[in-house]
Image (cartoon, coloured by chain):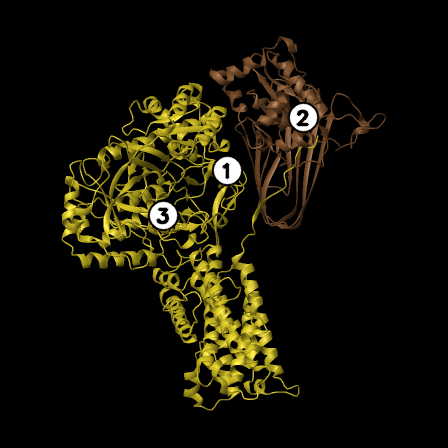
Amino acid sequence: MSSAMSVALPSSEPPPPRASHLLADYRPPAGGVDEMLDAAGQVRPPWRGMVESLGEIDHATLAARWEQARRVIRENGVTYNVHGDPEGMSRPWELDPLPMLMPAGEWPRLSRGLAQRATLLNLILNDLYGPQRLLAEGLLPPELVFMNPGFLRPCCGWSVPRNRYLYLYAGHLARDNDGEWVVVADKTRGPSGAGYAIENRIVISRMLPEVFRDCQVQRLAQFFIAAREALQELAVTRGTPRIVLLSPGPTSPTYFEDAYLARYLGFGLVEGGDLTVRDNCVFLKTLGGLVRVDVILRRVRDEECDPLELPRDSAHGISGLTHAARNGNVVVVNALGCSLLESHAIIPFLPTLSRYFLREDLILPSVPTWWCGDDAAKEHVLANFDELVIKPSFPRPGVGAVYGANLSSAERQGLRDRILAEPQNYVAQQLVSGSTAPAWNSGELRPSHIALRTFAFAVGDEYQVMPGGLARVSAKEDSLGDSALGGNGSKDVWVLSEGPISPASLLHPAGTPVVLQRSTSDLPSRVADHLYWLGRHAERTEGAARLVRSIIARLTSETALSSPQSITALLQALSGQGRVRPEFAVLFADERIDQLESELLAFVFDATRSGSLAAMLASLHRAAAVVRDRISIDSWRILNGLRLELAPPLSADAEVPLGDVLSALNRLVLDLSAFAGMGTESMTRGPGWRFLDMGRRLERALQALALLQGTLVIPEADEDPIFEALLEIADSSMTYRNRYLTNLQLAPLLDLLLTDETNPRSVAFQVAALNEHVEALPRGASQLLLVSEQRITLATLTELRLADVGVLAQVDASGQRTKLDQLLGHTADELRRLSDEVTKHYLIHAGPVRQIGEIRPSG
Amino acid sequence: MKYKVTHTTIYNYSDQVPLCLNEVRLEPRDHRRQTCHSHKLRIRPEPTRVDRRVDYFGNHVGAFSIQDGHDRLSVTAHSQVEVAPPEVPAPEATPPWEEIRDRFALGQPPWWLEARQFIYESPHVPIGRPQREYALASFPQGRPWLAGVLDLTQRIFKDFRYDPTATTVNTPVAEVLVARRGVCQDFAHLQISCLRSLGLPARYVSGYLLTAPPPGQPRLVGADASHAWLAAFCPEIGWVDFDPTNNQIPGTKHITLAWGRDYSDVCPIKGVLIGGGSHRMRVAVDVLPLDEAAPAMER
């Protein structure tokens, strides 16, 4: 992968030079078409404004802004998950700072051509899922439909609202060898990229505001406003229409975009498990019950949308969705079955079909394409491998595009044999070199190959084309492919305007009266579940970090050997929680300090070790990733930035001073506190916040109970160091000193850490908060009596209130604090039961869906 | 022949099922030789509604959901069907098989578009060299189409052993071809695969077969089974049924429920559910000839 366009690089990359110097070194390849320079090496007129405007920004400013932009991308966590990449979740989106300009004179024809193409594709879908006249009249070979796995027979014979199958269309454009724009691929399934386009626009227009203004760039927001309004008009029910964006979830390559678009358009982000079909209508499962859904903007593959009727049994789908759509009770966007037209084999037939349906020629030609099911086309393909890219007619796993010129003679023969055996399964396209445009590359401008992804959306009876798009850039011309986001970077696309620009923003649509809303109970149960676990993971990580920090602080201080009991006791607490091996706790007693240190380092940094701090942090990152659209942007930034980093970084075998570890832990604890503060200060007190906070409270109580139990039940000879450590871990030393000065005693300590409801670190405080939360959870009006979770919190709170810390502090005849042990153990058991009850009542609305065994004819 | 067919499927679940959605293809479709005089679907617990529709292949589909908790689901289809014997032409009078293959491969007159969709691969029916080579033994050059298909039917009947333990719903055709064992569904898929691998249209038929009781014993109620066979297409004649499991051209003992590209298009009962724990399923099919009045056989 070229490092050129990566924004993920460390910040040591040299800054872009002054724009006026940029041109001096920019050399597009000879014989190709460059977007910025003409054949004589002169800047093309449409680009002059930008080049001049860029030139007015001095070097340092430009460099600082680019750093800032890269930081925004990192902090916003713009990602594109790469298939098969285990680290895919964290691969940042790669953006080039220089936009691609689309001259005002060129755009209208492209725009008309894309709208025409979308119109035509929609007409073809209407025919193939309806009367199939194209087949009967011989205008389209039946192979392209009957062999096409995208042809969904359950979707035939019923019409979709307004005969609209295709809502969102994406056309892939590249310049052919003559410099004309041609369509390389049509994306009809529910194409991705529009969200990345708007994100790119926001980043680049902030980085280059004066350039953006000077260049008269057409705005993107109007396109999204129109799309949103069009979807709202589709709503089946009156009143407030409910539109959801159906995503395959966080493992999907484009989950970031799904979440981003949902938030930008103001639609709920859901996964298959959040929706259910009752009485042929689709409902969202929420904490408060089922809520009807009118429109589903889907990012799930057609064949995975309905395990009951469609071919693939997938957890992403909704059983009964096809039948609900068939009954007109929900609108699916794009309609089920649209991926039929993603086959490249359709392309050669489009000119004829355009004349048939529209009585027009295609405004925008396709790249020359040959379907080998046609004998003449097959002969052409077999004779011209070198100039072609050969693809399967219908996408199949493991079969990709092949560049004829790159084949060895053996591979050539193999492909030839396969084409001859199954000609219908192959399609070939002319290689187009595409154009180049300047891209930022290690301190200078280098030509990079460009392909455009453009978008159109059905509004009323026609298609509106987004004045912009996603330019995908690649150092090599053949790596752009036509996959969702091939290539290795992207550019913002600036469509220039000759007239004035009317600003519009989706965030403040003018003149639309907004219905005031307060947080309601229609939070999807799944999201509540995720928030609950986010709270638990955050607190668990913080608790472990505090505990290990206290241990390391004691090991590194000079007083270490003078208070060995506290270290032993804390180590025992660590092993008592199952975090480290039990023998770990005796290492210190044996004075094998070296071994202990390396064990502690492993506990902190080794993510492969289960229960380690690093592993907890990884769980926390995962928990945050799945709810990132539900937490504030600042909260996300904090979580996304959480790191256990040593400064300077760890080299391979170097000794790590424990002091450095200590400061890394300090930073982590601070960041986690900042996240907790965000939860307190920035979240509305809706059910989402309640579940996040319940997770946090429950985990904090369990941690505190385990720590007290692990250190106090069996008394040490000198307990003062232990008491000090406990106060420190619970961040309560100051409070204790204010109340009792330096007189360390167990009873007041137990009061502070266990039963004092005013100390936000005490167990009683957590239980009181939990009690308040379960009171406030939505429940049916018929439930007048206390529900089980209310009983648990009330009983536990009462038990803590009635506890006598003086009695609990006493050591009995067995030499232990048995009463304390019982209270701590019982409270922990009850809290675990509370977690089960809450999960049962609110979080599991339904188990996994499965198919019942099919009966086969046994005759 | 007139029949009364009763097809019962009962699911028992170890845990409550709060929601299930189902699609059934249990209503016999009409065709040239078959008329369904009456059909009733009885479902317990009773769903709020049963939506009836006709699918892509013209089969009757009933869709229903049960939205209240249940630990048992029973679906019973009662149908009265009349079946007429086929008119089978003399095998030698049918056109050479290559002629049919070539006409499907080359031209596309609209009148056989309906059959054309049955020459391609489908989820349970691959097209491949092994099937093609197995089939070719029955299709020497110039052999009349019907003679070839009948020979292939007979070879599958002879070469393969009926063995319900050898395969499942998902055993691929290629494995069946190697193991030479299976049930009616496997044999039907195999023969369809053989014919399509030669470029000849063939479709899957699901239905019932009247079974004769062992000599001297009364017919047992519920002992019949659902059955599967295939049909192949010749432009001059239309669709002709073949039953490789019993080496015959189905006559009046075969009752057609539905047809499609393969089993996945015509599964008699398909459902998805939530919960339920483990489940046990019981199927009983009873084909009662109405002409032979035999009161002892009634329940």
Q: What's the colour of chain B in the image?
A: brown
From the viewer's perspective, tell me whether residue B226 is left or right of residue A7: right
Mark 3 sits on what residue?
Answer: A1
In front: A243, or A702? A702
Mark 2 sits on what residue?
Answer: B80
Task: Give, as a three-letter code, the residue at label 3.
Answer: Met
Q: What's the colour of chain A in the image?
A: yellow
In front: A367, or B234? A367
The reply to whether the C-beta atoms of the residues labelled 2 and 3 are less than 8 Å apart is: no
Q: Position of residue A639 (x, y in %)?
A: 39, 63
Q: Position of residue A270 (x, y in %)?
A: 44, 50
Mark 1 sits on what residue?
Answer: A323
Task: Give, as a three-letter code, the residue at label 1.
Answer: His
Q: Which numbered disc, 2 or 3, marks the residue closer to the eye?
A: 3
From the viewer's perspective, tell me whether residue A47 is left or right of residue A506: left
Mark 1: secondary structure: helix
Mark 3: secondary structure: loop
Instruction: Name which of mark 3 and mark 1 comes first in the sequence.
Output: 3
Q: Which numbered disc, 2 or 1, marks the residue closer to the eye?
A: 1
Marks 2 and 3, how far apart at CA: 68 Å
